[in-house]
Amino acid sequence: MEHQHGARGRDRYDRIVQSLPDGLSARAVDPARDLEPIAALVNAMRANIGDPLLDSAADVHDIVAGTEVDTARDTLVVASLDGELLAYAVAYPVLDNEKPRVFLMGATHPTQRGRGFGRALLEWSIDRATERLAALPNGTIQAQCGDSDSTAERLYQAAGMRPIRWFTDLQLRFSERPTHTDPHRYPLPEGCTSQTLETVDRETLRSLHNACFADHWGSSPVSQEFWNNEFLAHESSRPHLCEIVFDRSGAAVAYQLTSEFPQDAETTGRVLWIDKLGVHPLHRRNGLATTLIERHLARAARDGYEGSMLGVDADSLTGANVLYARIGYTRRYGGVRYILGDAQYS
């Protein structure tokens, strides 16, 4: 499968091919055969920089064949003569009307660094992202890497990108922070009830999520297609451990979605993730977030997990960092978001 869609696409493809060392080829991702090899490639790169989080084939699928991804045009792999994947790149679009953007994703196997793949793939990705955003004047091009990945940071900076935001993965270990195993020890506010994800209308939850994150940096409304077909349907979701809170009128006011990533067990231990945690703006500062976290931790401890993890924006406006630190979460790893040129984004 080659990138030969339109003159610009053919030119972009020809440039990447001409830049490769002899014996290497480039083509679009083939989801039927490339998911596991790309996951292995990404995980080798992450291990090389000390990132403890690993990708599964399902994670890769969402990146290379997600809701808005045109796999034939938005993805690229570099392969050796025997078919081994050495590098990949994706111009991953999120083209909503409010904050249209394209994320540049990719990796080069550690043994192949220094051969110019990264620079060539980044140039290819930026050109494709620019094409994607041509009709969206307020669009931005962004990329993220681990804060220990100095090679990627130099690459982004050389392309004119600048850091705009920092993120942190936090971990709580039950061996260091004793935890009750009964969620009911942490009662909800008077008049509130809760349900698991399995019993809640998905549209009700999507509306709540969008309301909870409307004032968060980098967030924009999640579409029904993405919410149902990718986020909630991902193999990592643990619906029976999620919790959605309703007030006395029956309105959904807060939620916590739980995930598990078994591929990380060797590096993080067997942990549950708070994948999403949100409280409606009108119901904040009444202890709901703390209660949902403690109930999540109690379920994890009850079911034999070693702890919990979550990701947080270092500049969270809701005070999430202070809350997590108070409960007992500590830093495990960090990431840096880059943006191209002088583009403004919020």
Image (tube, rainbow, N blue to C red):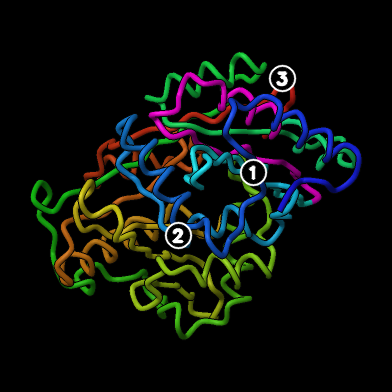
Give the magenta range.
97-125
Residue at image position (63%, 59%) is 65
Q: Position of residue 173 (x, y in %)?
A: 16, 49
Residue at image position (45%, 83%) is 198
Q: Which residue is mark 3?
A: 341
Instruction: Inspect the image, locate mark 3, and give the three-letter code of the amino acid beneath it.
Output: Gly
* Measured Cα–Cα span from mark 3 to mark 2: 33 Å
Q: Nearer the viewer, residue 23 or 87?
A: 23
Instruction: Inspect the image, locate mark 2, and give the three-letter code of the amino acid beneath it.
Output: Ala
* Measured Cα–Cα span from mark 1 to mark 2: 17 Å
Q: Which residue is mark 1?
A: 76
Q: Which residue is mark 2?
A: 57
Residue at image position (28%, 52%) is 264
Task: State which quadrant residue 26 falls in.
Answer: top right
- Which secondary structure, mark 1? strand
Q: Position of residue 154 (x, y in %)?
A: 52, 16
Q: Nearer the viewer, mark 3 or mark 1?
A: 1
* Measured Cα–Cα span from mark 3 to mark 1: 24 Å
**Residue 200 lies within the magenta run:** no
Mark 2 crowd level (few <14, some 14–19, many ≥20, 10 Å Cα): some
Location of the C terminus by quadrant is top right
**Residue 106 lies within the magenta run:** yes
Where 112 sits versus 226, above or below? above
Where 63 sits versus 12, above or below? below
Q: Nearer the viewer, residue 9 or 166?
A: 9
